[in-house]
């Protein structure tokens, strides 16, 4: 949290994916009060404090009001500047919200991290687990309203952490069905797309990763209701996840999840084979 999300990695909001303000929690409010108390103890206004920690006044205000998760650099600088006896660092340890991850994506992210199998269909952008750094940065740089540098870096760090799952969990089976047009779009330009195709084809060589392209022309298509993800837990329960522009929905109802499984199984048969998908990706790269 898209990935931006899910598929966006929780970045919209995924994994595909999450740059908005977190909901105000008691821990965030408590942290903000600690910072404010030490700032006032030092005799500093927000305007005086901001340049000392190298963050803007609005950012300081948001953190003190509990509306924004404090970046690690802010915690370290505030602790040093305010001589807070370790209180600010201590308060930060009680913050459970992971920066760069959309609130609606967090439950799914926990399931994703423990899954024994994960199925992803995406028609809007390359799934977060498959993205390169350059592709991800292009997506975040084009977000509206614009993200600041701190928000982009927080989301980049979270996306990189999620992507390690493909290598760190070799016994988890990952299946991806991705629309062919997402590579033809050349998001970020030809060089970014070439690197993306190289990265995706390398991942497809892993024993636990399967990647299929959905053809541009298809008379019948079981994925017309949009992106979806399916997760099988270690106790073999299945959950579904669907993400919109500013929301995500976790599905646990057996009837709904069964429908997702049925659609995904059909799409597997409708998409190009694993071998042809890789061949097609290499052809695309050669044409760039």
Image (cartoon, rainbow, N blue to C red):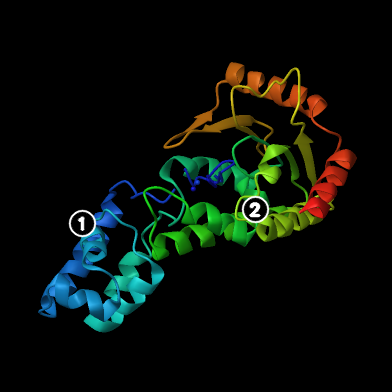
Image coordinates of residue 14 in percent, x first then y, are 54, 44
Residue at mark 1 to residue at mark 2: CA–CA distance: 34 Å
**Disc ID at residue 65:** 1
Residue at left offset 25%, top offset 81%:
52
Front one among 99 and 220: 220
Residue located farthest toward the front when viewing the structure as drawn: 287
Quarter of image, res 84 = bottom left
Compared to residue 200, the image places residue 120 above or below, namely: above
Image coordinates of residue 134 in percent, x first then y, are 61, 61
Left or right: residue 47 compared with residue 52:
left
Compared to residue 5, the image places residue 84 above or below, namely: below
Left or right: residue 115 compared with residue 57:
right
Quarter of image, res 246 = top left
Residue at left offset 66%, top offset 41%:
182
Front one among 223 and 190: 190
Q: Residues within 10 Å of mark 2 (few under 14, many from 20)?
A: many
Image coordinates of residue 257 in percent, x first then y, are 62, 23
Sequence-wise, the earlier of marks 1 and 2 is 1
Q: Residues within 10 Å of mark 1 (few under 14, many from 20)?
A: some
Secondary structure at numbered mark 1: loop
- Which residue in the structure is indicated by mark 2? 131
Front one among 161 and 222: 222
Residue at left offset 31%, top offset 46%:
23
């Amino acid at each position: 949290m898209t990935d931006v999300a899910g598929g966006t990695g929780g970045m919209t909001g995924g994994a595909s994916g999450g740059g908005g303000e977190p909901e105000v929690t008691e821990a965030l409010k408590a942290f903000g009060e600690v910072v404010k108390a030490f700032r006032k103890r030092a005799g500093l206004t927000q305007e005086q404090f901001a340049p000392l920690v190298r963050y803007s006044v609005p950012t300081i205000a948001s953190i003190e009001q509990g509306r924004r998760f404090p970046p690690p650099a802010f915690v370290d600088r505030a602790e040093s500047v305010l001589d807070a006896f370790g209180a600010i660092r201590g308060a930060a340890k009680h913050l459970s919200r992971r920066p760069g991850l959309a609130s609606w994506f967090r439950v799914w992210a926990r399931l994703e991290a423990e899954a024994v199998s994960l199925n992803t269909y995406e028609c809007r952008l390359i799934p977060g687990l498959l993205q390169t750094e350059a592709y991800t940065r292009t997506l975040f740089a084009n977000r509206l309203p614009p993200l600041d540098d701190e928000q982009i870096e927080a989301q980049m760090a979270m996306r990189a952490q999620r992507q390690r799952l493909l290598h760190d969990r070799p016994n988890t089976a990952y299946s991806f069905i991705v629309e062919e047009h997402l590579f033809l779009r050349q998001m970020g330009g030809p060089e970014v797309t070439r690197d993306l195709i190289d990265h995706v084809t390398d991942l497809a060589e892993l024993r636990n990763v399967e990647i299929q392209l959905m053809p541009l022309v298809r008379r019948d298509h079981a994925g017309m209701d949009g992106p979806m993800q399916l997760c099988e837990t270690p106790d073999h329960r299945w959950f579904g996840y669907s993400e919109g522009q500013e929301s995500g929905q976790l599905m646990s109802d057996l009837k709904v999840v069964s429908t997702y499984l049925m659609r995904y199984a059909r799409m597997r048969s409708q998409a190009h084979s694993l071998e042809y998908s890789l061949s097609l990706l290499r052809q695309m790269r050669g044409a760039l």
